[in-house]
Image: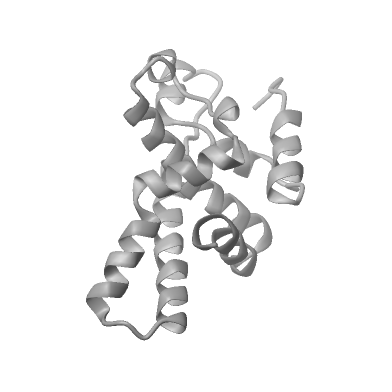
Amino acid sequence: MTGMQTAPYQDFAREKLGFEFTNIQLLVTALTHRSYVNEHKKSVSEHNERQEFLGDAVLELVVTDYLFNNFTEAEGTLTSWRAALVRTESIGESGDKLGYEPLLRMSRGEKSGGIRARQQIIANAFEAVIVASKLELGHDDAKTFIHDTIIM
């Protein structure tokens, strides 16, 4: 990350997430797509897929917990509601509202790709941002982030 400007990432965290990272690399990685690493192999080695992996599980758990504790509907109904909340389109919309797309590091090809592909990248980055906040502040703050951006 030598020579990289991290101020825009810290500004985003402060303005949109409500805190500053002590380890800004967590957020930078969350917003780095694999394709960017492929184009910048000499200067970048981490992308967001591991964070996305954990973020998907955290998101599912938090949404499931919320639905279980707040509704008495049958399992099939709750499952449908959860699927609607955590689908790519919903998560992508939340990412769009946060406005981090200009900070996403992805290849030139991905930047010029189709809307559907970019929406998937935005949604995947959202899951990675969940983990960046979880690693920085803890599970409860990540849970609050999910409630504020997905559930409510």
Q: Position of residue 143 (x, y in %)?
A: 57, 66
Q: Position of residue 142 (x, y in %)?
A: 59, 61
User: In the depicted view, which residue is nearer to us: 149 or 136?
Assistant: 149
Q: Position of residue 125 (x, y in %)?
A: 48, 41
Name the colouring of the figure: one colour
Seen at 73% across and 47% down, the residue is 21
Seen at 62% across and 69% down, the residue is 140
Q: Is residue 107 left or right of residue 139?
A: left
Does residue 71 sit above or below 125 in this rendering? below
Quadrant assignment, res 8: top right
Q: Is residue 30 visible?
A: no
Q: How many marks?
A: 0
Does residue 39 sit above or below 98 in this rendering? above
Seen at 33% across and 66% down, the residue is 81
Q: Say which quadrant the N terminus sits in.
A: top right
Does residue 147 sit above or below 74 in this rendering? above
